[in-house]
Amino acid sequence: TPQAAEARALLPAIDKALAAEAEARAKEEASRSLWSYSTHKDDMSGKSVQWAEVVSSNTLEFDFPYNVVQHGRLAIRRHPEHGLDVILQIEKGQIQCSSYDCPIRVVFDNGKPSTITGNEPADHDSTTVFLPSSLIARMAKAKEMRVQFNAFQEGAPTLIFPVKNLDRARLK
């Protein structure tokens, strides 16, 4: 029928439009950032503290007494007194650090692992370790960052962070 012929003639244009729409969705998905940003006022100085945080894409599950499925968090903090920090946190458990040694292994995308030295926080919170701020430049260029640390009686677990599309301008 004439209507069927007209419909067949429209099919290539419809296929092309659907392909363009799928490509646009794929680009949007690829550009989506999983970083969350916040700002709050420092009570002592009255100045702004900026945070960027991303949650690990994998989980950890430690034995008793920390037996809960948990994600890790990787944060960047710009503080008026303390400057720029990279902070690794777990919800439960103990990251093994001491005042003289805190080896952390990191790898970006498909690169080679390297060992850096972390620092325990001033309050000795065993769920937190400070990493060198020099990692931020590498995070900004990478899609994924894997972090391995020593955990008390849990070996050396690895957390995987989707670090792509870090907006460093939001931390100025």
Image (cartoon, helix red, strand yellow):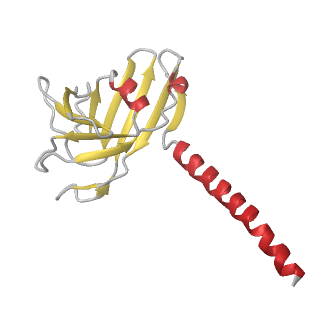
Tell me what residue is drawn at x 74 percent, y 69 percent. 11
100 in relation to 112, above or below: above
Q: Is residue 65 left or right of residue 20?
A: left
Position of the N terminus, as image quadrant, is bottom right
Q: Quadrant of residue 64?
A: bottom left
Q: Nearer the viewer, residue 96 or 135?
A: 135
Residue 63: image location, x then y, percent: 17, 58
Q: Residue at x 14, y 24 (%)?
A: 99
Can residue 88 be seen at all in this image of the molecule?
yes
Residue 3 lies, in percent from the top left, at 87, 79
Nearest to the observer: residue 54 or residue 68: 54
Q: Position of residue 65 (x, y in %)?
A: 18, 56
Mark yes or no: residue 41 visible: no
Residue at the image position 36 percent from the left and 37 percent from the top: 74
**Of 108 and 10, the residue lying toward us:** 10
- Give the residue at the far right of this rendering: 2
Residue, x 15% and y 45% (percent of image)? 156
Residue 78 left/right relative to 11: left
